[in-house]
Image: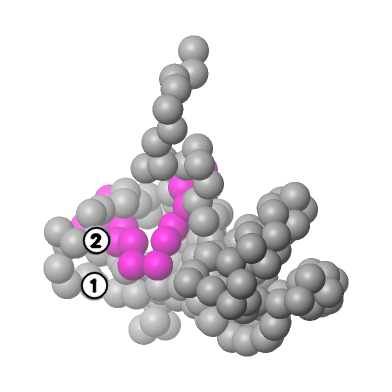
């Protein structure tokens, strides 16, 4: 089994292969994947690793692998009113739903119950195929916060 380390994507340049993975698969530390060229391999990453679109991994054999966010079924909710969008984000967060946030929209993995809830709040919801890159969270690496933990 090849083990992989994350590299700085901007410093890498060309990669040897790509693999497109849905969000849930980009949160697994060990899994079998099939590369774009059809090659199968086992990924072994440090526990807790979350892969993002564009991340580059280097294997212990020197292979460089670019991660792509695969399109998946998502719901995208739009609102022109910022307060309405904030209210929707609050309700989704209250249900511990992973959310991607853009200018005037929220995206989450498709769930018809959540779609109905947001429509009831006045948002327009579209079910579509798109990549999903939810917020990492305030305590994720790279998202500093103002106090230490003993």
Q: Position of residue 96 (x, y in %)?
A: 71, 51
Marker disc for residue 61: none
The structure residue drawn at horizontal position 70% and vertical position 63%, both measured from the top left corner, is 88
Q: Which residue is mark 2?
A: 9
Overall secondary structure of the magenta section: loop
Q: Secondary structure at mark 2?
A: helix
The structure residue drawn at horizontal position 54% and vertical position 82%, both measured from the top left corner, is 130
- 1 and 2 marks in contact (CB < 8 Å): no
Quadrant into which the N terminus falls: bottom left
Q: Earlier in the sequence, mark 1 or mark 2?
A: 2
Q: Which residue is mark 1?
A: 16
Q: Is residue 139 visible?
A: yes
Q: Which range of residues does the magenta coloring cover?
A: 47-63
Q: Position of residue 49 (x, y in %)?
A: 46, 47
Q: Is residue 61 visible?
A: no
Q: Position of residue 86 (x, y in %)?
A: 63, 60
Q: Secondary structure at mark 1?
A: loop
The structure residue drawn at horizontal position 77% and vertical position 53%, both measured from the top left corner, is 95
Q: Quadrant of residue 113?
A: bottom right
Q: Which of the pair 116/50 is nearer the observer?
A: 116
Q: Which of the pair 123/112 is nearer the observer?
A: 123
């Amino acid at each position: 089994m090849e083990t992989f380390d994350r590299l700085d994507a901007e410093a890498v340049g060309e990669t040897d292969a790509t693999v497109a993975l849905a969000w849930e698969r980009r949160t697994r530390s060990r899994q079998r994947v099939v590369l774009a060229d059809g090659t199968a391999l086992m990924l072994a990453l440090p526990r807790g690793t979350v892969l993002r679109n564009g991340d580059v991994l280097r294997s212990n054999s020197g292979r460089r692998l670019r991660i792509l966010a695969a399109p998946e079924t998502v719901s995208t909710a739009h609102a022109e009113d910022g307060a309405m969008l904030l209210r929707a984000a609050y309700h989704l967060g209250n249900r511990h739903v992973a959310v991607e946030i853009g200018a005037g929209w929220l995206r989450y993995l498709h769930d018809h119950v959540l779609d109905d809830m947001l429509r009831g709040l006045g948002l327009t919801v579209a079910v579509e195929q798109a990549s999903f890159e939810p917020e990492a969270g305030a305590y994720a690496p790279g998202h500093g916060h103002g106090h230490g933990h003993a």
